[in-house]
Amino acid sequence: MDQETLTGNNISELRNEYDKKVNEILPNKAQSSDGWPIHLNHCFGRVVLDNLFEDEWYDYIDGRPAYENLSEEELQEAIDLADMMLEEGKSTVEELNENSLRWRDEL
């Protein structure tokens, strides 16, 4: 069922776009690209959402799945981050992954 925001935009389309990029397109691209530091969908979700909030995303989103609880603006920014990884490739994926790991004290 489609959901519209107060401005009349279809937020369901944004959710579907985010879901497809994080769960299908990015992992497929990682499998066919050489040397990407992450390959699994949940890793791409972590990287996108951590970079969206510039911190561990768990502190900012209560419900699961997380992308269903993002605002229209947050969803668009998350999609933009996924697009940036797709367009710019390995170096951007490495940079955003390192940001995420640093915010999680895993570096």
Image (cartoon, helix red, strand yellow):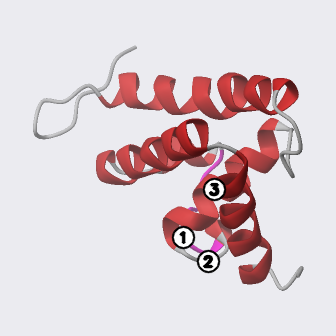
Who's the residue at 88% across and 82% down the image? Answer: 107
Between disc 2 and disc 1, the foreground one is 2
Q: Please indicate whether residue 64 sits to the left or right of residue 4 in the image.
A: right
Who's the residue at 66% across and 24% down the image? Answer: 25
Query: Three-letter amino acid code at disc 2?
Result: Asp
Query: Three-letter amino acid code at disc 3?
Result: Thr
Query: Three-letter amino acid code at disc 1?
Result: Tyr
Q: Name the residue beneath numbered marker 3.
A: 92
Q: Which comes sooner in the sequence, label 1 or label 3?
A: 1
The residue range painted magenta reads 59-64
Q: Name the residue beneath numbered marker 1.
A: 60
- Categorize mark 3 by other alpha carbons within 10 Å: few (<14), some (14-19), many (20+): some
Query: What secondary structure is marked by label 1?
Result: loop
Q: Which comes sooner in the sequence, label 3 or label 2?
A: 2
Outermost residue to the top: 1
Query: What secondary structure is marked by label 3?
Result: helix
Between disc 1 and disc 3, the foreground one is 3
Q: Please indicate whether residue 88 sits to the left or right of residue 37 in the image.
A: left
